Image (cartoon, rainbow, N blue to C red):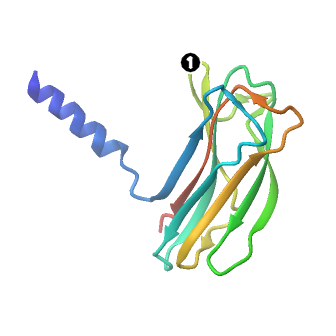
Amino acid sequence: MKQLLVSVVFCTLLFSCDTLGVFEKSTFFPEHSWSSKVQPVYTFTITDTASLYHIYAIIRHEDAYRYNNIWLRITTKAPSDTAKTQQINLLLADNKKGWLGTGMDDIYDHRIRITRTPQKLRPGNYSFTLQQIMREDPLPAILNAGIRVEKVQP
């Protein structure tokens, strides 16, 4: 029995590792709603400048979320650069398929790429600030929001 448990733990660790992920962090909203006043900031450091990267927004919501999309204001601060802000409309569902993310029970996870092409990043510290800018505020049925940065596979 002990060997079986060790084997299961080892296999879980082996298959859950994602060597291409450089950074992933999300913020949990305890009231299951996201106020526009809550603007999580994510900071990470890039050292590998030879690689190309994709940047993703992470959204987790309940099935009770009433919209097919979510509008975000993302402020990016790159090393030795001024902060840049953009508004992005992330599609979470469509009328044919329903929710586009992966789901279990009534919880859906979305990892949506926000960079159109692979990005060459400079060495140093990067900072991302997320703000939901939907008309409904606070936005109900949102559990988590975050950022993921990963290397593009060669």
Confirm whether residue 131 shows in the render.
yes
| Amino acid type, callout 1 | Asp
Vertical relation: 30 (above or below) 82: above
Q: Which residue is drawn at 59% across and 68% down?
A: 126
95 vs 24, nearest the viewer? 24
Q: In this figure, which residue is indicated by the disc labeled 1? A: 105
Q: Residue furthest front?
A: 37
Vertical relation: 117 (above or below) 1: below
User: In this image, 50 relative to 39: left or right?
Assistant: left
Q: In which quarter of the image is residue 94?
A: top right
**Residue 36: image location, x then y, percent:** 78, 41
User: In this image, 6 relative to 106: left or right?
Assistant: left
75 vs 152, nearest the viewer? 75
Q: Which residue is drawn at 56% across and 66% down?
A: 53
Confirm whether residue 116 shows in the render.
no
Q: In which quarter of the image is the N terminus?
A: top left
**Residue 98: image location, x then y, percent:** 73, 27
